[in-house]
Amino acid sequence: MDSLFIAGRSALRDAHELIDRFGDDAGYEAAIRAEQSRDSGNVLRFCHWRQIERVIATLSNDEVRGTIH
């Protein structure tokens, strides 16, 4: 099982903002922002937006991950 690492509250905040603004297309928006960051040479923002893309995918998934109590 893959574990999702969330670097901090800013990652959750950005994911939440994209979900609120773009709905089902939030993951695509995060991917676009990651590509724009990569194209401009900003590696840190590229990594940030890629993580946001994974957070959105995880939050949108109904599958239970981890231990169920």
Image (tube, rainbow, N blue to C red):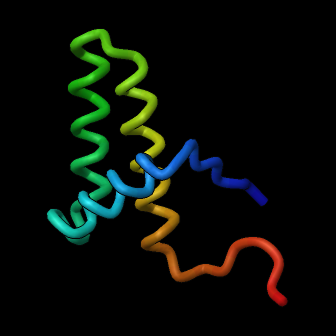
Left or right of 12? Residue 58 is right
Residue at left 37%, top 38%? 49
Q: Quadrant of residue 2?
A: bottom right
Q: Which quadrant holds the C terminus?
A: bottom right
Residue at left 22%, top 13%? 40
Residue 13: image x %, image y %?
36, 56
Q: Which quadrant holds the N terminus?
A: bottom right
Residue at left 15%, top 64%? 21
Q: Quadrant of residue 20?
A: bottom left
The correct choice, above or below, for 59 with respect to 36 in the image is below
Instruction: Find the residue positioned furthest to the front.
Output: 9
The correct choice, above or below, for 4 with respect to 48 in the image is below
Instruction: Find the residue positioned furthest to the bottom.
Output: 69
Residue 60: image x %, image y %?
43, 72
Left or right of 6? Residue 16 is left
Left or right of 67? Residue 30 is left
Residue 50: image x %, image y %?
42, 38
The correct choice, above or below, for 17 with respect to 37 in the image is below
In front: 56, or 14? 14
Instruction: Find the residue positioned furthest to the top.
Output: 41
Residue at left 30%, top 10%? 41
Residue 47: image x %, image y %?
45, 29
Q: How many numbered marks, from 0 up? A: 0
